[in-house]
Image (spheres, rainbow, N blue to C red):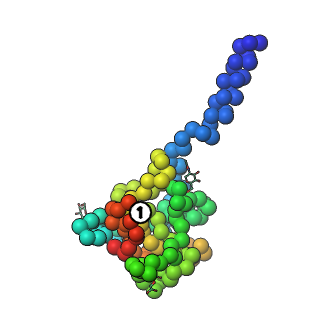
Amino acid sequence: MKFSIIAFLSLAGSIVALPTAPLEARDNPSLAPITLVDGPSHSDNVTCKRGSYAASYSGEDVYEAVQYAIALMQNGETRGKAKYPHSLHGNSTEHPLNFPESCPADKSRYEYPLEKGSYYNGGPKNQTTGNERVVFYHKDDEIDTQNHPKAYFCGLITSGGKKNGEFRNC
Ligand SMILES: *[C@@H]1O[C@H](CO)[C@@H](O)[C@H](O)[C@H]1NC(C)=O
Ligand SMILES: *[C@@H]1O[C@H](CO)[C@@H](O)[C@H](O)[C@H]1NC(C)=O
Ligand SMILES: *[C@@H]1O[C@H](CO)[C@@H](O)[C@H](O)[C@H]1NC(C)=O
């Protein structure tokens, strides 16, 4: 009897402990091809410069970030404490963000963190992001002629490596 109570307690303990265990990065959604209108070619590099700060991503990094973000949107999921992808329609009067006409400032314009050679998936702490974001425009139901999600590349923005730095166009 004593043994079974202890066994029961330790089982209950492990069940209770589950939700408080640190969550690691979540599983990746399955990725389908997308059309990224006006996106950089996959083998090109896109460089963000701000003063002496510079960061470079491949066109493929940019494509994959948008592809990942759209897969999350289709699953009703987000990544990270700031719940990416999220709409980007804010604008600072001091340093306005400027994007092409295909990217009007409404809720269908999104930002998603960029990573070199991989996807941003929240990371082990769910809050660490790099300094750059890809900005894209995507309406839920917009598809290309092959039934793939269609999005418009708007550009990259950067905080320039400054903690709490304001985002500006790259
Ligand atoms: C892009 O950057 C990578 C890494 O720095 C480099 O190896 C590659 O040659 C660059 N590609 C182009 C097209 O400039
Ligand atoms: C990480 O963020 C997502 C939302 O983007 C949230 O659902 C999840 O619970 C968060 N995980 C942790 C450990 O904070
Ligand atoms: C941001 O605001 C400025 C000034 O009102 C405007 O010129 C610019 O087009 C706006 N940019 C975006 C992306 O809405």
Residue 15 quadrant: top right
Which residue sits at x=33%, y=66%? Answer: 160
Quarter holding residue 130: bottom left
Q: Residue at x 63, y 40 (%)?
A: 19
Horizontal placement of 168 versus 150: left or right? left
Measured from the top left, where is residue 148 in percent x and y?
53, 71
> Under 8 Å from ligand 2: the CB of mark 1?
no
Q: Is residue 149 visible?
A: no
Q: Secondary structure at mark 1?
A: loop
Residue extending furthest toward the front: 94
**Residue at the spot 70% in from the left edge and 29% down from the top edge:** 12
Q: Residue furthest bottom?
A: 101
Q: Residue 47: x, y in percent? A: 29, 69
Is residue 31 at least partly visible in the picture? yes
Residue bearing the label numbered 1: 164
Where is residue 20? Give x, y as percent.
60, 39
Name the image quarter holding the N terminus: top right
